[in-house]
Amino acid sequence: MANNLPVDLPAHMACVEIAEPGGPEVLRTARRALPQPAPGEVLIAVYAAGVNRPDVMQRRGLYPPPPDASDLPGLEVAGVVAALGEGVSQRQIGERVCALTNGGGYAAYAVAPAGQCLPVPEGLSDEEAASLPETCFTVWSNVFDRAGLQAGESLLVHGGSSGIGITAIQMARARGARVFATAGSDDKCRACEDLGAERAVNYREQDFLEVLQAATGGQGINVILDMVGGDYINRNLQLAALEGRIVNIAFQQGFTAEVNFVPLLMKRLTLTASTLRPRSAADKAAIASALGSEVWPLYASGAIKPVLAATYPLAEAAEAHRLMESSAHIGKIVLRMGA
């Protein structure tokens, strides 16, 4: 779509809001006034929006949005820049973009800081582009920024068939790392290996600690990306290599565990964690800049590919959440605007 394309803006828009904390049924369609871009923000005409675990947590009442963010769910979108807030010069009206939002993505229009927008990689559809921001920002900031994964090192991705997982596997493999993964079925394990994992372990049938110690000749794993927590914490410490780095980005099996810290001491390990949403606009803009130079060319060349599990109309957001909570999917779930 050409730059400077005039966009006629309606007064109101379709959206999906959370009626009250609860199950998927509390997601309901509504109409609201268009959000107005603040200084430094852009208004995006949304063509597709990604569905992520934080959306589910927000719907349950466990992950409230920041005070200055929309109460609508949705942290990533793709579409066209429809209006510019004061001081924005790096984006243009009519430009195809995908963006990490601070909330409000489940709507026909959403605002995002201009620094959190990226051009849609050449050759990608709106649905594919909408699947990128949340996972790419998360993987880059944790695996490469915090954990410093280098070419030739090994990475273990727990939950390898998730949106985060498929992104981490492909990104690390494209940058020269050895990649391993865990997943909950043989089909999911095969999908991880098709995407570049050297070995994927079905955690329901095998002990990943035992299997991956053998696969690495007893050397262990340099970087572990964990969104499980619970009893994985001790096993991650045992599996980590000398000077290994363990990054937790979620704790789906619980935030507490009785931990033996001897491996942390003896192997000089780094145990860290982070969450993306509360980080500053400047932090997120820096991540976007790194993605634009280091990762977006890999999508444009086809070296990394989006993996979509399912696409639903916006009005069927509840069904999208049911699929997310079933964990039956491989890849990303996306909402599209319109029928």
Image: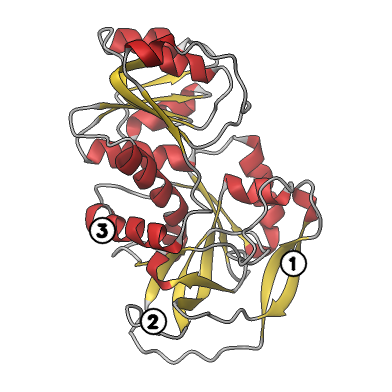
Residue underneath mark 1: 29
Q: Position of residue 89 (x, y in %)?
A: 34, 82
The amino acid pointed to by label 3 is Ala
Q: Nearer the viewer, mark 3 or mark 2?
A: 2
Answer with the quarter of the image where residue 196 lies: top left
- Which residue position is annotated with label 3? 300
Q: Is residue 312 above or below residue 221?
A: below
- Pointer 1 local density, CA inside 10 Å: few below 14, some 14–19, many at least 20: some
Image point (61%, 28%), residue name? 255
Q: Position of residue 26 (x, y in %)?
A: 79, 54
Looking at the image, is mark 3 or mark 2 earlier in the sequence? 2
Q: CA distance from mark 3 to mark 2?
A: 26 Å
Residue 300's x, y, as percent?
25, 58
Judge whether residue 301 can be spotted in this image.
Answer: no
With 113 as the anchor, is 75 left or right in this view?
A: right
Residue denoted by label 2: 88
Determine whether, in the image, residue 78 is placed left or right of residue 339: left
- Label 2 sits on what residue type? Val
SS category of the residue bearing label 1:
strand
Q: Earlier in the sequence, mark 1 or mark 3?
A: 1
Packing grade of label 2 (10 A; few <14, some 14-19, many >=20) is some
Vertical placement of residue 2 versus 249, above or below: below
Q: Kindly state the secondary structure of the residue where label 3 is placed.
A: helix
Q: In the rendered view of the protein, which quadrant contains the C terminus? A: bottom right
Q: Earlier in the sequence, mark 2 or mark 1?
A: 1
